[in-house]
Image (cartoon, rainbow, N blue to C red):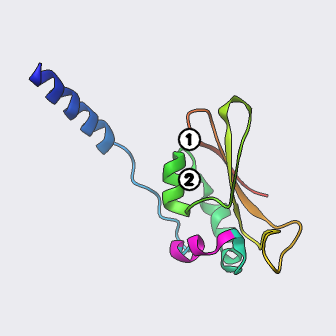
Amino acid sequence: MRSLSVGCLLVCLMCLSCRKPLPELKGIETEVWMNDKNGCSGARVTSIETLKEQKAALLGLSEMEIVQVLGKPDRNELYKRNQKFYYYYLQPAPECEQHSDSALRLAIRFNAMGLAKEISVE
């Protein structure tokens, strides 16, 4: 019985160690990004083209991994069939003092398994 639990533990550790490392988004200062809640300070505006070029690096990441890379989303929405969307404002959001009604944002759609399925700048 003890060898079975040790074996299960080893298999779990091997599976976890095979997970690919989190991507580093080149050209984006993650600390500055995470501190620019709703894009109010305008620090995220400079990241728009960089995000468009590197959005494929975020595909397939789990919700928790996205939060580790980009921080807590500015907004999230739950859709039918357990789909979830995370939104990160790239330009000042309506909640900001100086804002645009049509502010660009990074939209990440998660599938029912909790993996990033689609990423767009809208």
- Identify the residue at image location x=64%, y=64%: 51
Start and end of the magenta stretch?
A: 30-37
In the picture of the structure, the residue carrying the numbered disc 1 is 115
| Displayed quadrant of residue 48 | bottom right
**Amino acid, disc 1:** Leu
**Residue linked to disc 2:** 58
The amino acid marked with disc number 2 is Leu
> What residue is drawn where x is 26% and y is 38%?
14
Image quarter where the N terminus lies is top left
Query: Which image quadrant for residue 15?
Result: top left
Q: Residue at x 63, y 36 (%)?
A: 111
Q: Residue furthest top?
A: 1
Please tell me whether residue 36 belongs to the stretch shown in magenta: yes
- What secondary structure is the stretch in magenta mostly built from? helix
Q: Which mark is residue 77?
A: none
Q: Nearer the viewer, residue 40 or 107?
A: 40
User: Which quadrant holds the C terminus?
Assistant: bottom right
35 lies left or right of 122: left
- Does 100 sit above or below residue 82? below
Question: Residue 74: x percent and y percent?
Answer: 67, 61
Q: Secondary structure at mark 1?
A: loop
In the image, taking residue 4 as reference, residue 103 lies left or right, namely right
Look at discs 2 and 1 and give the one toward the viewer.
1
Residue at 70% x, 69% y is 38
Q: Position of residue 86 (x, y in %)?
A: 66, 52
**In the image, residue 81 above or below residue 119:** above
| Label located before the other in sequence (2 or 1) | 2
Residue 80 locus on image (x, y percent): 74, 32
